[in-house]
Image: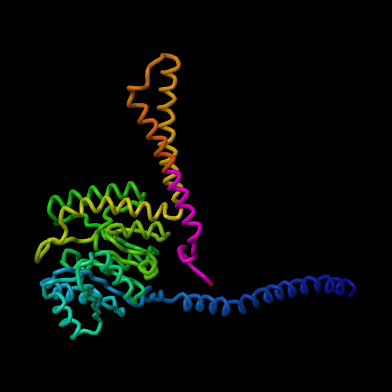
Amino acid sequence: MANEENVTNENKPEKQTDNNASDNQQKKQQPNRQRKPQTRRRQYNRRRSSGPPKKKGPVFKKISVVIPLYNEEESLRPLFNEIKKAVKPLKQDHEIIFVDDGSNDKSLEVIKNLASGDNKIKYLSFRKNYGKSAALHVGFQEVTGDVTITMDADLQDDPAEIPNLIAKLEEGFDLVSGWKKKRYDPFIKRTTSKFFNYVTKVSSNIDIHDFNCGLKAYRSEVVKSIKVYGELHRYIPVLAAWEGFKISEIPVLHHPRRYGKTKFGISRFFKGFVDLITVIFTTRYIRRPMHLFGFLGALSFLLGLIVNIYLSISWFVHHISLSNRPLLFLGMLLIIVGVQFFSVGLLGEMMVHNAKDERDYSIKDKN
């Protein structure tokens, strides 16, 4: 009996151990059973939250199209139809602003007829011809959209490029200029434009190919910040870039002129040089004139001083007479001109110092 009890007692712990092991396995399995619904729920929620990608709405709510024109009566109606065709798929509010630069044909009459049938059209008409820069300046003041498109009225700029320009703006740029990679203009116009674009690119350090393309897209803050006057419409990208805006360009289609003839003659060749000098001075040195005049004055003064030192050495050492040396007058003239440049620079600095204004600074954001 004792042996049986011992055997029984010895077997009992083993059974308990087996029971405990099975219990532990059940306990380990139970949490897994409880976690599975939670895991499935989380996975379902992730799939539900990710879902199909939501479509973003348009970045710009309203498009303003500004068209300066001079004697373009034949092209206005086809241009209007093509613009409407281009902006319709965008499904955004829009306005078309015609700026008549003192036309002496029936351009204004055509615009009024178009405006009578479409309330999206605005127009302004100058009493005389002031130039493209003046027309753009006034048109920019009238825009109410948050993106502005400019184009010429001669149908050489293609309105179908409007969505492409806006798409490029949406990448984060402030101004997008068109690049007429293949141009349909007379040889002289193409050649002079290439020359001006190259000189402007080197002078401004802005890497675009076509500064004077009429087809451009702007954010609203750009058109409200830059001042276009005289003939500076050719250098709007330069003016915008030196205000701190981001500039880009895209190739655009260019068409041969359908009606009339170009309004720009040989005089634009000479005006371009003067305008380039004006742009460089007004953007780089208008608030620091001493940097320009001081440099020119120092250079002139230094050259004159070197010339006079050379002549003085020749007179003292080699006993060369200076009475018949034109170089002496050149050295004196360079020194006098250098002093004058310095004086002009100092006067400019005094004027800038007394005319400081916070509105001269381009502010990106403010709270």
Q: Which image quadrant is residue 282 in?
A: bottom left
362 displayed left or right of 144: right
Residue 108 to residue 208: above or below: below
The magenta segment: 341-366
20 displayed left or right of 344: right
Rendered location of residue 78, percent (x, y)? 14, 73
Identify the image quadrant of the C terminus: bottom right
* Residue sitting at the far right: 2
Residue 352 magenta-highlighted: yes
Rendered location of residue 128, percent (x, y)? 19, 70
Residue drawn at (81%, 72%) of the image: 13
Rendered location of residue 6, percent (x, y)? 87, 71
Q: Nearer the viewer, residue 197 or 49?
A: 197
Identify the image quadrant of the N terminus: bottom right
346 displayed left or right of 74: right
Q: Nearer the viewer, residue 240 or 109?
A: 109
Residue drawn at (36%, 74%) of the image: 146
Q: Which image quadrant is residue 83 in?
A: bottom left
Residue 348 magenta-highlighted: yes
- Protein image colouring: rainbow
Q: Which image quadrant is residue 255 in?
A: bottom left
* Residue sitting at the far front: 323
Q: Nearer the viewer, residue 208 or 358?
A: 358
The number of discs equals 0
What secondary structure do most residues of the magenta stretch adopt? Answer: helix
